[in-house]
Image (cartoon, helix red, strand yellow):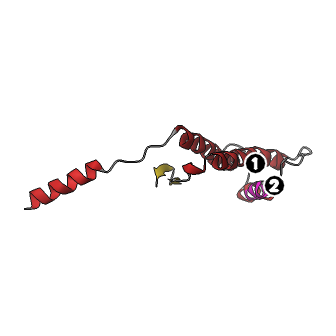
Amino acid sequence: SVTSTSSVYAKKKRKKSKKKPTENHLKIRTAVDAGDKWEFDLEREHGLTDEQACVCVSIVGQNLQEDEFPPSKGDRIVELAKEGWEHLREVDRLTKLYPECGDQTNIDGEWIML
């Protein structure tokens, strides 16, 4: 009958446990969220144009593998880029430190365990 089939399905669904994030998963999420906020704030909080924000993000990408960020020499965009570089370096450090935490993703602002 339909009732017994749906009942069996409901039991199977209940038995299937959802993965729960560990403390290390949460550390990575915090670092990723901080980097995302930095990027969104370039225009909203710091008043950069879309083009300036793209240049800023590009500077971060160009220097991501460097051990030190180049001096800003008073350039505001480079100063903001350094903040983004620090965020992304932290994400990189944490993902290397906790490779087992690669089983999560952020879709439209919601963290999901894979």
Q: Which percent across, then down, holds residue 23?
A: 53, 37
The residue at which mark 1 appears reads as 85
Position of 39 with respect to 11 (left or right) is right
Q: Amino acid at mark 2?
A: Asn
Q: Residue at x 44, y 43 (%)?
A: 20
Q: Which residues are magenta?
A: 54-61
Name the residue at 81% across, 55% down: 63
Mark before the other along the chain sequence, 1 or 2: 2
| Magenta run includes residue 72 | no
Considering every residue shown, the one lying at the far left of the view is 1
x and y, in percent, of residue 42 in the image: 70, 48
Q: Which residue carries the number 2 mark? A: 63
Q: Closest to the observer: 16 or 84?
A: 16
Magenta-highlighted stretch: main secondary structure? helix
Q: Residues within 10 Å of mark 2 (few under 14, many from 20)?
A: some
Say which mark, if any, is on residue 34. none
In depth, the one of 87 and 55 nearer the eye is 87
Residue for point 55% across, 49% down:
101
Q: Is residue 6 left or right of residue 23?
A: left
